[in-house]
Amino acid sequence: MKKYIKYFAFSLFIAFVGCKEDYKYPLGGGNPSLDLKEVPNSAFFGDSLSFKVGVTDQGTALSTLKVQLYYSEDLVSEHTIRTKEYGDYSGKIYVPYLANIPNGTATLKFVLQNVGMVTVEETKELPLSRPDFPFLNLIVGDETYKMEKLSGYEYAVTEDFPQKVQGYIQAPAYGEHGNVINFGWEGDNVKEGTMQVIPFSNYSAGNYTVQFNTLTYAAAPFVSYKINDTELTMVDDNTYFIDLQLENGAEINIDGIADIDTWWIDSDYLKQEGDKYTFQAISGKYKITAKFDKKYFIVEAMNGTDFATLNADGTGAIWIIGDGIGKPALSNQVGWDTGKALCMAPIGDKKYQVTVVAGQQVRADDINFKFFHQKNWGGEFKNDNLTTDGDVVYVGDGDNGRDPGNLGVQSGKTLEAGATYVFVVDVSGGVSNAKLTVTKK
């Protein structure tokens, strides 16, 4: 019983202390007041503005002073100060530099609040102007190129540039309270406040102009890469892709790649005659990936939004994973990286082919790759469901120098260096009864 009496007494004590606190600072008590001692009369976008405000109350403790900046009705910047004592408080508030905001008048709002949640506000109109930068800098790696002012908000630099220029733009601090402003790449647009490089590109290397508008953020040049009049999507600086429905025998139009004549063209998918390209695989949906660093196209069969797989009826796709083969050259060998698996071209009648030149896309005397049902581990062809009658390339069985299903070159034999070979997997007799032929062209 004594324990419960003590607990009750302690609870009463806590409640009493709580009541004293509520009594000391009741909601609605006090009368906070502001004295704007130092407040800017005008500013530029991108400024950091200093202010000094005196705060007091009639015996009630203060809580916070908020300084807020509004563009129209939008809160764009805020600075909060804890006001533990009466007196003067100083600070800075940033004036954001944003696209497509014309010169105009913003609103500075000062909000003082005490511990009783009572507030007082004062506002001041703040005329804002966009800085008239004398120049900008285009920063590309360790190089800085001065962009001269053309007119209005337009700046440009003309130099001997490579086809692709990876850099960001920097505006110098402007005026007494200005800050350096960086313009970089975010998503697929130029954005202030970042140094992520902007992927400028031209149709060819040489003397050309890079431009930027500090009001609209319009920038140039950007080359648009298109296949069949549809723009490719950028993955990174060297990789662009597109998913297309393609028809066998139809002409493929490639636009925007200035040095396309130097690219390696995969004859399994594209027949090249001068500057004309014709699609060679069966009609269907394909992902085409342009690899600018290696100058070739990866073509892969699709099923909806997924990579195609080999269906039970023999339609779909067959993939190559393993050593001794790679496109556009052996320097880009597939290996056992499933992400680099090669999609054999579906040529109809449930047949799939890959064409390679010995010594260039396939090793002449040492191969160790196999055929899979998907662009990943899973279904695969082994010696119990894949056979060949060839006298140079054989199918491994686990005891003949290769794992089951892995291809090898017969001992003492070799593919002829420089000769073209066509590997065809035929599953028209059933997925469990596949035939491999290797033909020298």
Image: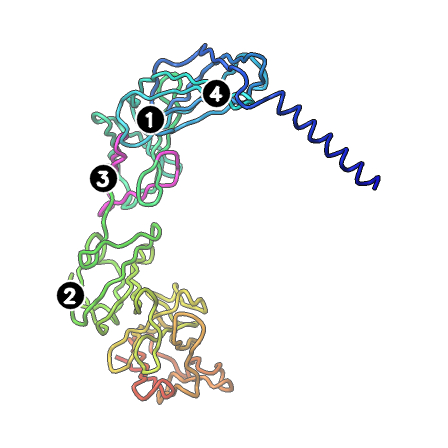
Q: Is residue 114 left or right of residue 150?
A: right
Q: Secondary structure under badge 2?
A: strand
Identify residue for label 1. 71
Q: Residue shown at 62%/22% (left/top)?
A: 23
- Please provide percent x and percent y for residue 143: 37, 35
Q: Residue shown at 31%/26% (left/top)?
A: 72
Mark 3 vs 1, N-terminal side:
1
Q: Secondary structure under badge 4?
A: strand
Q: Secondary structure under badge 3?
A: strand
Q: Is residue 19 left or right of residue 416?
A: right
Identify residue for label 4. 119
131 inside magenta stretch: no
Asked if residue 422 is positioned above or below residue 172 in the image, the reply reads: below
C-beta proximity under 8 Å, tags 2 and 1: no
Disc 1 marks a residue whose amino acid type is Tyr
In front: label 1 or label 4: 4
Q: Over which residues does the magenta segment extend?
A: 192-221
Quadrant location of the C terminus in the rendered image: bottom left
Q: Could you give the CA–CA distance between mark 3 and mark 1, rounded to whole angstroms?
A: 41 Å
Q: Could you give the CA–CA distance between mark 2 and mark 1, rounded to whole angstroms?
A: 53 Å
Q: Which mark is residue 207?
A: 3
In front: label 2 or label 1: 1
